[in-house]
Image: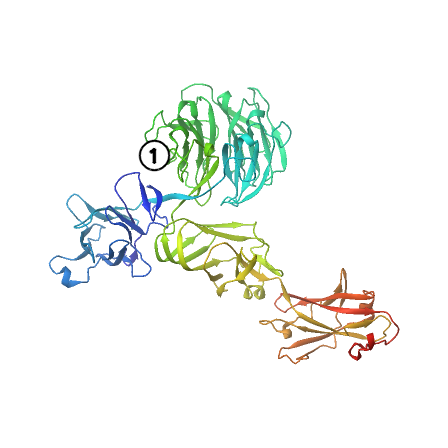
Amino acid sequence: MKGKKFHILLLLSAITFMVFLGGKTVFAENIDPNNDGSQYAYGENVGWINLQPLQGPGVTVTDTGLTGYAWGENIGWISLSCTNTNSCATVEYGVKNDGAGNLSGYAWGENVGWINFAPQGGGVFIDASGNFNGTAWGENIGWITFRSDWVFITFTTKWGIYGSGDGEFYGPRAIAVDSSGNVYVVDQYNHRIQKFTSNGVFITKWGIYGTGDGEFLYPAGIAVDSSDNVYIADGGNHRIQKFTSDGVFIRKWGSEGSGDGEFWYPFGIAVDSPDNVYVADGWNHRIQKFTSNGVFITKWGIYGTGDGEFSFPVDIAVDSSGNVYVIDTGNNRIQKFTSDGVFITKWGIYGTGDGEFKDPIGIAVDSSDNVYVTDAWNYRIQKFTSDGGFITKWGSFGTGDGEFHEAFGIVVDSSGNVYVADTWNHRIQKFGRINTFKGTNVKVSDVKFRVSLVFTEIAVSGVTTVTMTERGPPPPTGFKLVPLGTYYEITTSATYTGLIQICINYDDSTLTPGQEEQLKLRQYDEPTDEWIEITTSLDTVDNIICGETDHLSFFGVMYPAIIPATVDINPDTMNLKSKGKYITCYIELPEGYDASNIDLTQPLTISQGELSVSAEPSPTELGDFDSDGITDLMVKFDRALVHQMLSPGYIQLTVSGSLTDGLQFEGSDLVNVIDKGKDHADEGDPSSVVY
């Protein structure tokens, strides 16, 4: 462990609790020891302690002890090696390591005095992963508990009110997310599906009351497959309907009954990784399994209280191993099965305690196979391990953030964000793991999307979210996105001041060297409806582009798909009766490009509409023909061929070609085309005489 920076979280010793972090209600849970938020500590009387403050040296673990400094938001600097010998002279100062990870000795707080790492009834040790556990004692601040296995969930955002308009709900019943992070909501009593971005921006909707294709009668469940197709448990119509991600009807199956492939009010629906479809067939008290096209595979369950028996199963979820979790509502429990319906385990009874339920309704599984349950009449969410071990809970009755009025549906996206259909508050609530903590020069990284941010200062901790999406404002004319058609939408619930540095590790596999050298990081500015360049650095070796901004929105890595060229076509008045041999064109490129790099071995054309003529291979010449200090390329086109594209009037002619690095350029010039007789001058202007 020599020289290794440690990442720990010190908290109160309660297994589950709520704390207030910068004014936000936060729900702590003992999971994920490697979460990015594990660089903070908590003292029972002094609040948060940053163990790796970016404005200072942070804390380092060696084989013999600890060195460096931590920062307490309410108590200032804490020295782990206690270098202030005048203050430490009466005690053996510094935190020691016996080599086996057991710590002893004292840290010194500049405003709070000694902190004992091996007090009577306590003690701190480092586990095999380099994480800290145990308790220390501050002579003036009381107990500090070290835990390596806590992260924090907090309210992030919400959307929806009662109504029938876009983004309004009447009893939202179920919820799902697709591979792009878009959110689909079963708006049950409006008999429709609504689709949103991950932050609640309305995208589209489909469905009305009825029995036809794409119509619904109290839809109850929703799931999305690996191709982002959407499956709806159309409860009152006793069938399943399948749609594209935009709501285009694909197929349906099922009718009222108790036979194979028949349903009596299907409620919940789930899809596994091979796209098999599982349906909680509510009033038939069973689970049915189908192919993605609705072909019956198997079923299990009867009415009862025994293992594998159900009393009104209403929702279902599948984990990464294909195990199936069923909300057995009438029995107030969860049952777990193999993908073929073999009983594995169960948990839950009626009650209000941890792991107890009062009408559980919705269930979801995250990427770590943790299980989330909406405990409707307890007005809360409970979270468990895959075997039913209680992890945490949050929520109470109410209309505030983090409060519920019978939450039904729940889903977890690939980043660990939890979306809850807060049914009778007619809204969706989103919760996330805190990853942006109070402090200065706060760094947040999103490994999945390879984006990192550094906030100058965070005043109130929160959740920063990065989403890659194909939906965003159109890029500036002549620019393309990298990857093609992909935006980065970045949001935070933290309160910040100052600049934010944003760095994106881009994919260069589709870029030519010339395109890569011209990459720019741009940000969409909503008030002006413009894309603003914010680039500060470009590393084409490690494929990292960075920029600075003072606010968050949409970002795009872009390159100029077409370089805008300045084109001067001579003559600018063309007489179709002229018998001259050539039309001359001067091409000038913008700053950062050189006309000498125009590739004359590739097509260089002049065009009008769909018609075009290629430049003559010679003569060509480089020079500053307009005396503006910038090199131009002179090329010529066959006059007779160009004339064949033209008719009298003002015509926009476009000249385009390639650079040697593969970049494209394009420019236009307006010419006056006349047909007045050979060698005619336009309106007596000598400059318009054609030859």
Residue under the point 61% across and 73% down: 594
In-image side of 676 versus 611 (left or right): right
Give the total of numbered labels: 1
Q: Quadrant of residue 592?
A: bottom right
Please, which residue is most extreme toward the right here?
677
Q: Nearer the viewer, residue 377 or 484?
A: 377
**At which x and y percent is residue 238?**
57, 24
Q: Quadrant of residue 228?
A: top right
**At which x and y percent is residue 510?**
58, 58
Q: Residues within 10 Å of mark 1 (few under 14, many from 20)?
A: many
In-image side of 363 versus 72 (left or right): right
In-image side of 429 versus 295 (left or right): left
Query: Where's the C terminus, which quadrant?
Result: bottom right
Above or below for 472 versus 691: above
Which residue is labeled 1 in the image? 390
Q: Nearer the viewer, residue 275 or 645?
A: 645
Residue type at mark 1: give it. Answer: Phe
**At which x and y percent is residue 171?**
50, 32
Residue under the point 60% across and 23% down: 255
Q: Quadrant of residue 357?
A: top left
